[in-house]
């Protein structure tokens, strides 16, 4: 199988040094790959594809006219991260989540950060994700962001940068877990010799975190799903099954006397903790979006009364805002009195006159994003777009500058990937580690590595044609 390296093209290759030598942590794996035939490698990839389909590892693409069910293609060449690098990421992510939790508690209560003029008040309270009904609230145990999936990228300098924080309903962890089982079967001997840290206890840790939120000795826990047509339904059902808890939708639940009950064949059973996979404003039509058909009328009153815990807490979405992202280094310094361990990507806020003028003049060299969009939508990659697209986004920015930010185009690192069973070529990747916040903040020693399967593409989102890789974190 022909191998094409990308590390001479201005990108950081995760597997190879610039002199084409294997990086030390890839040494054993690289030599193994070189020792097996192209036919064997192709067969391993084919087996992985079949295993994904057998496991039902699919997601839905709403705009796809050819059909909704897709597998998140799993490339069998893993991304390997040495222990010393992971320690930096781990410390930086813990610091970031700690600061964002302080931030959320503050903006819904004392609002000191506004009074001290660290962040513009109108930026927060004017966001559609700032939930006024949450003002004055403190969630159970004081934790807002229980489950976080933070997106990072490695630039050509070899340093990691935080791309965005996902504090609402971060998805993808089931693919991380199931991919590990598939890849372990593909390369069993390497796991024994390399010292890959396990991720199989994630479901246990998630359950323990959810139990921690309730004061009851044996709380009843449910995973709240929008239903089978949701893009991440596989994950909702998978996690409920792995934890041994109920998978419920809004139709299964009702509120009486500010307590939430599940309807069962034996009558009503009270639910104590809900891991909700529904966006904030759809949780309760009485408190938020009155048109929501997914939520449970009265849920928010039960939450305010302390009769149910919700993970993540309602209101966390405001910290997901891409405009707020630009202020996270200041947020870390303000609440923790520490320098940020992980870097932010330099960000231009189009709401600011000087930043906006720079973006409009240099749009061909920038990535422009809608502040509230996700999944790779509402985005312009300037160097990959034509003049017509540039002009379209200029007009969008001028019409609604508060809705856009811009960032320089990063040279996302690459990992060798099997392309059409014919060659191994570098493809751009990002990294989504998962962080649980219960009794303590814990970073799971693995991650979902998303890969842009299209040659030259920087868009790794599954909804935009991306795939995934197993992520091996070494001891």
Image: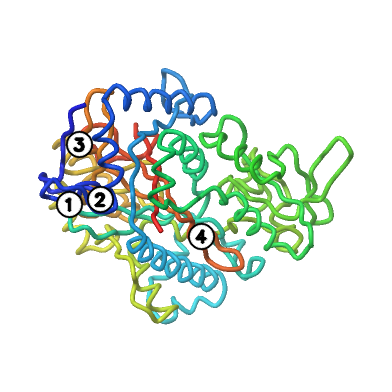
Gap in Å between the C-alphas at discs 3 and 2?
Answer: 30 Å
Q: What separation in Å lies between label 1 and label 2 (alpha carbons)?
A: 9 Å
- Whichever of labels 3 and 4 marks the residue nearer the N terminus, that label is 4
Determine which residue is flagged by label 1: 360
Task: Give how far across and how far down residue 360 sits, in percent.
Answer: 17, 52
| Eye-nearest disc, 3 or 2 | 3
**433 or 276: nearer the viewer:** 433
Using the numbered discs, state the Cα–Cα distance from disc 1 to disc 3 in whole angstroms: 25 Å
Residue 408, picture quadrant: bottom left
**What residue did someone put label 4 on?**
130
Judging by the rendered image, the residue that carries numbered circle 2 is 398
* Mark earlier in primary sequence (1, 4): 4
Which residue position is annotated with label 3? 456
Mark 4 vs mark 2: give the one in front.
4
Q: Residues within 10 Å of mark 3 (few under 14, many from 20)?
A: few
**First of labels 3, 2 by sequence position:** 2
What residue is at 48 percent from the left and 27 percent from the top? Answer: 51
Identify the mark nearer the N-term, 1 or 2. Answer: 1
Quarter in which the C terminus is drawn: bottom left
> In this rendering, would 182 be left or right of 162?
right
């Amino acid at each position: 199988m022909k191998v094409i390296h990308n590390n001479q093209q201005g990108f950081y290759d995760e597997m190879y040094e610039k002199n084409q030598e294997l990086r030390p942590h890839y040494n054993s794996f690289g030599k193994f790959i070189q020792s097996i035939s192209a036919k064997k490698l192709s067969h391993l990839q084919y087996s992985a594809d079949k295993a994904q389909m057998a496991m039902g590892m699919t997601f839905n693409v709403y705009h796809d006219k050819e059909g909704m069910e897709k597998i998140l293609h799993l490339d069998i060449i893993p991304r390997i991260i040495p222990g010393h690098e992971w320690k930096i990421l781990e410390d930086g992510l813990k610091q970031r989540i700690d600061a964002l939790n302080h931030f959320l508690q503050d903006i819904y209560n004392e609002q000191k950060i506004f009074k001290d003029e660290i962040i513009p008040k109108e930026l927060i309270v004017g966001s559609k994700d700032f939930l006024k009904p949450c003002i004055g609230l403190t969630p159970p145990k004081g934790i807002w962001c229980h489950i976080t999936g933070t997106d990072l990228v490695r630039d050509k300098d070899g340093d990691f940068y935080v791309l965005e924080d996902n504090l609402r309903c971060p998805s993808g962890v089931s693919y991380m877990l199931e991919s590990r089982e598939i890849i372990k079967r593909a390369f069993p001997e390497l796991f024994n010799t390399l010292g890959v840290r396990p991720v199989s206890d994630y479901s246990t840790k998630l359950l323990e975190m959810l139990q921690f939120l309730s004061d009851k000795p044996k709380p009843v826990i449910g995973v709240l799903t929008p239903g089978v047509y949701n893009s991440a339904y596989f994950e909702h059902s998978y996690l409920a099954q792995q934890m041994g808890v109920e998978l419920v939708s809004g139709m299964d639940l009702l509120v009486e006397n500010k307590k939430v009950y599940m309807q069962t064949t034996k009558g009503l059973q009270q639910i104590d903790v809900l891991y909700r996979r529904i966006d904030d404003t759809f949780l309760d039509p009485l408190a938020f979006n009155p048109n929501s058909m997914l939520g449970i009328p009265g849920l928010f009153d039960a939450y305010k009364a302390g009769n149910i815990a919700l993970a993540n807490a309602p209101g966390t979405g405001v910290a997901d805002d891409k405009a707020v992202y630009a202020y996270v280094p200041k947020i870390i310094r303000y609440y923790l009195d520490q320098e940020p361990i992980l870097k932010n990507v330099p960000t231009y806020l189009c709401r600011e006159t000087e930043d906006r003028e720079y973006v409009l003049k240099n749009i061909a060299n920038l990535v422009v994003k809608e502040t509230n969009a996700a999944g790779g939508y509402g985005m312009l990659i300037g160097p990959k777009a034509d003049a017509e697209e540039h002009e379209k986004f200029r007009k969008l920015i001028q019409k609604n500058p508060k809705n856009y930010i811009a960032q320089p185009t990063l040279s996302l690192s690459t990992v060798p990937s099997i392309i059409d069973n014919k060659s191994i070529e570098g493809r751009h990747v990002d990294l989504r580690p998962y962080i649980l916040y219960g009794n303590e903040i814990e970073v799971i020693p693995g991650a979902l590595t998303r890969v842009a399967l299209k040659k030259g593409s920087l868009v790794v989102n599954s909804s935009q044609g991306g795939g995934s890789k197993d992520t091996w974190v070494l001891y």
